[in-house]
Image: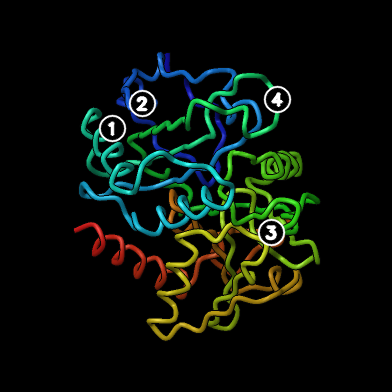
Amino acid sequence: MLQPQANVETTHSAEDDPRNADIQIYVDGVLKHRDDAKVSVYDSGFMLGDGMWEGMRLYNGKWAFFDDHMDRLFDSCKAVSLDIGMDRAGVLEALTMTAAANGMTHDVHCRLMVTRGVKIHPFQHPKLSQSGPTMVIIMEHSKPVSTLQAKGIRLATVPQVRGLPMSQDAKYNSHSKLNCVIACLQAEQAGADEGLMLDPHGFVNTTNGCNFFIVRRGEVWTSTGDYCMNGVTRQKVIDLCRANDIPVHERNFSLFEAYNADEAFLTGTFGAQTPVADIDGRAIGTDGGRGPVFQRIRELYAALVQESTR
């Protein structure tokens, strides 16, 4: 049965919706009630974190930026020799099937997961996964809690970093998220909502769950993108800034610039843009991280979502 949420608020905190107690979940082509949806303990995703996933939003019966999400999913799977077993049309059909079974058309969040599948023995080698991939689709009626916009997010800089591409490239949206989980725990232990992670050279990079932006003197700054998940929402914000004469820079910057930012915000598929109220106990700007540039970007992004899902 669906358990009550703990009293924890993060960038992924959603309004409670009782309809989610009876959702149907897609497991390898079969829809199952959430209480009965299972994968094998031999599945490579469970055993090793060997898989890729996408988070997507459904508005007005359409998936926002579907092609961008599929580009990332298929590119990631190709890079690790993981055959999804279907093309984009097949993925869309599976998504459509799941949404229809749940009567979902708007304000829906989806987590689409693909692993290398069930292993014949509990060891690492990919060739032990011989039965084909596992695909799971979880959809929930999901709206961000309103308080996130009102009070903003508190960040704490954490010792856990996003590593170099030859260790684990952060561009993979993989099931292997232990470094992000550790960063999240470190932030929680510091009394913050989310962890601000540096890159291997000490420059400001990303958070454990979202991409990070600051605004200084009307200019939008974000990391180079070399060491962070290149988020779909992140790229949409960069593109919107360029198309609307808002100066934007993908560049190295340190905590010095972050602490002295006029505005700061996070981007992600679930929350779109969320203001950052303080970093390491230092207040950002004069209105909880919000300001005219942040508000303009939120308006532009909302209009883009509306246009793309008409």
Q: Which residue is mark 1?
A: 98
At horizontal 26% and vertical 35% (from top left) the residue drawn is: 99
Left or right, 16 with respect to 179, comes to: left
Mark pair 3, 4: CA separation: 42 Å
Residue 47 to residue 165: above or below: above
Q: Which residue is mark 2?
A: 25
Give the residue type at disc 1.
Thr
- Marks 2,4: beta carbons within 8 A: no
User: What mark, if any, has residue 279 been given in the picture?
Assistant: 3
Q: Quadrant of the N terminus?
A: top left
Mark 2 Cα shell of 10 Å, populated few (<14), some (14-19), many (≥20) = many
Ranked by sequence position, the earlier of labels 2 and 4 is: 2
Secondary structure beneath dot 4 equals: loop
In space, the residues marked 2 and 4 are separated at their CA atoms by 28 Å
Instruction: Look at the picture and state if 53 lies above or below 6.
Output: below
**Which element carries disc 3, helix, strand or loop?**
strand
Rendered view: 52 above or below 35: below
27 or 65, which is in the foreground? Answer: 27
**Residue position for label 4:** 123
